[in-house]
């Protein structure tokens, strides 16, 4: 059988790599890789192909940035051309980015079954573009591969039939466990003069946190205060960089705030492993810190990954800087206590997905 696997943005690559590896080991599923080009900077795309040993994409659609409608529409137009030529039996999409949505719509309208890896996550916040992408993708997908039990409940409430839902575990954790020993942040930490467990690692890129310059200024003022207690390192996402550069009046940055360019997967996992606390609005990082057992303070009002809170590593602090600051200080004073692992976050998710695909396409 022929499958097409779609990647487009940074959080897609670590979800696709275990599947490509599994398919090539088995031989029964002939998989091609489509890169939409939603992310295109070397450190948002190419470096992940090297770090995660992903094969070169069979086709690069070169979509680039744009408004939601522009980006989604461009992916649809170019992906449809590819699918009409390649005629796959299955289209596999991962996560919740615009490329995920666009390719799901294209596949469904051409009557090609779609498999969604990481289905059923819900923040119940329609102001998040990703929530719309998740809901539409799941309604269309023939195969909803879920990471956690509550995802199944969410899908059933929206009318997705049981025969479409498969609890397979968390594909990101396949990559994390595969590369955890190789992951090494020491070069960048040495360069910045940072000591193991004695720094905060921060990432911020959600439009709700970074697109308003006044709110961004307040968040950075809070990070500067935290940096007085413990140095802060922040690999800056291109969306955030653009906002920092255009803010008027300029946003003040403490010298103890170490802003660096986005780093590759091996370096970032290495930096997470050694961090005292991670502060983030990323989806995937909430999950990776759960498996690493590193305290995570999530700078959001809601999360589509509540299991990371239930098992004890993640604290949903809200977006008010005072609340985030208090949560970090609390962890630095008292730690996070007992924590555990969600079921099936065991590094074997790609195998379970391949088993199900093979069963349905004998
Ligand atoms: C996208 C996803 C988001 C995901 C994030 C991961 C959607 C709607 N959003 O958000 O769910 O969490 O990726 O990182 O799909 N840019 C560059 N170089 C790049 C890519 C982007 O400079 O390689 C800049 C451009 O100015 C662009 C902006 O970043 O306009 C935003 O990029 P975009 O892909 O639209 O959304 P993200 O914020 O990256
Ligand atoms: N990541 C990385 N380098 C960075 C920041 C993040 O390799 O500088 C990795 C991180 O380990 C995780 C993924 O990128 O695997 C998360 O992507 P992102 O936060 O961009 O997206 P989200 O998960 O919020 O959709």
Image (tube, rainbow, N blue to C red):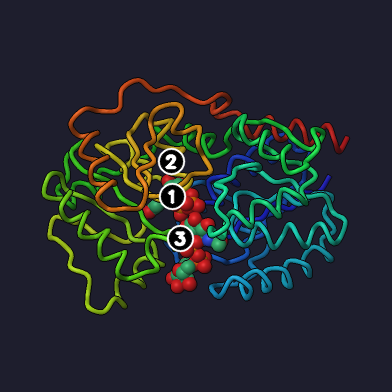
| The residue at label 1 has a CB less than 8 Å from ligand 2 | yes
Q: Position of residue 287 (x, y in %)?
A: 46, 38
Circle 3 is placed at which residue position?
44
Identity of the residue drawn at 57% across and 45% down: 15
Circle 1 is placed at which residue position?
282
Query: Quick one: quadrant of the C terminus?
Result: top right
Identity of the residue drawn at 69% across and 46% down: 116
137 relative to 349, above or below: below
Question: Disc 3 and disc 2: Cα gap in Å?
Answer: 19 Å
Identity of the residue drawn at 74% across and 35% down: 165
| The residue at label 3 has a CB less than 8 Å from ligand 1 | yes
Question: Disc 2 and disc 1: Cα gap in Å?
Answer: 7 Å
Circle 2 is placed at which residue position?
286
Q: Position of residue 212 (x, y in %)?
A: 37, 69
Camera-side residue of 237 and 158:
158
Question: Disc 1 and disc 3: Cα gap in Å?
Answer: 14 Å
**Is residue 102 left or right of 362 when viewed as pictured?**
left
């Amino acid at each position: 059988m022929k499958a097409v696997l779609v990647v487009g943005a940074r959080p897609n690559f670590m979800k696709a790599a275990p599947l490509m590896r599994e398919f090539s080991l088995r031989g029964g599923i002939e998989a091609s890789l489509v890169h939409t080009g939603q992310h295109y900077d070397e450190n948002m795309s190419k470096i992940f192909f090297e770090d995660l040993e992903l094969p070169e994409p069979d086709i690069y659609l070169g979509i680039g940035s744009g408004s939601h409608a522009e980006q989604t529409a461009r992916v649809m137009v170019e992906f449809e051309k590819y699918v009409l030529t390649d005629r796959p039996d299955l289209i596999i999409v991962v996560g919740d980015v615009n490329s995920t949505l666009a390719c799901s719509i294209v596949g469904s309208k051409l009557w090609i079954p779609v498999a969604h890896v990481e289905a059923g996550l819900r923040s119940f916040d329609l102001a998040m573009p990703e929530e719309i992408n998740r809901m539409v993708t799941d309604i269309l997908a023939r195969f909803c591969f879920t990471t956690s039990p509550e995802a199944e409940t969410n899908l059933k409430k929206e009318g997705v039939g049981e025969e479409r839902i498969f609890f397979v575990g968390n594909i990101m954790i396949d990559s994390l466990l595969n590369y955890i020993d190789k992951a090494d942040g020491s070069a960048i930490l040495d360069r910045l003069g940072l000591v193991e467990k004695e720094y905060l690692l921060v990432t911020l890129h959600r439009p709700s946190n970074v697109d308003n310059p006044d709110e961004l200024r307040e968040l950075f003022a809070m990070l500067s205060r935290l940096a007085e207690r413990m140095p802060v390192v922040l690999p800056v996402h291109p969306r955030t960089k653009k906002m920092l550069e255009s803010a008027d009046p300029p946003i003040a940055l403490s010298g103890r705030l170490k802003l660096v360019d986005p780093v590759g997967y091996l370096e970032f996992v290495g930096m997470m492993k050694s961090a005292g606390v991670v502060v983030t609005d990323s989806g995937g990082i909430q999950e990776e810190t759960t498996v690493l057992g590193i305290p995570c303070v999530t700078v959001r009002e809601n999360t589509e990954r509540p299991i990371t809170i239930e098992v004890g590593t993640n604290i949903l602090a809200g977006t008010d800087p005072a609340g985030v600051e208090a949560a970090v200080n609390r962890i630095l004073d008292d730690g996070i206590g007992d924590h555990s692992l969600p079921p099936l976050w065991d590094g074997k998710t790609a195998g379970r997905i391949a088993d199900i695909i093979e069963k349905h396409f004998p």
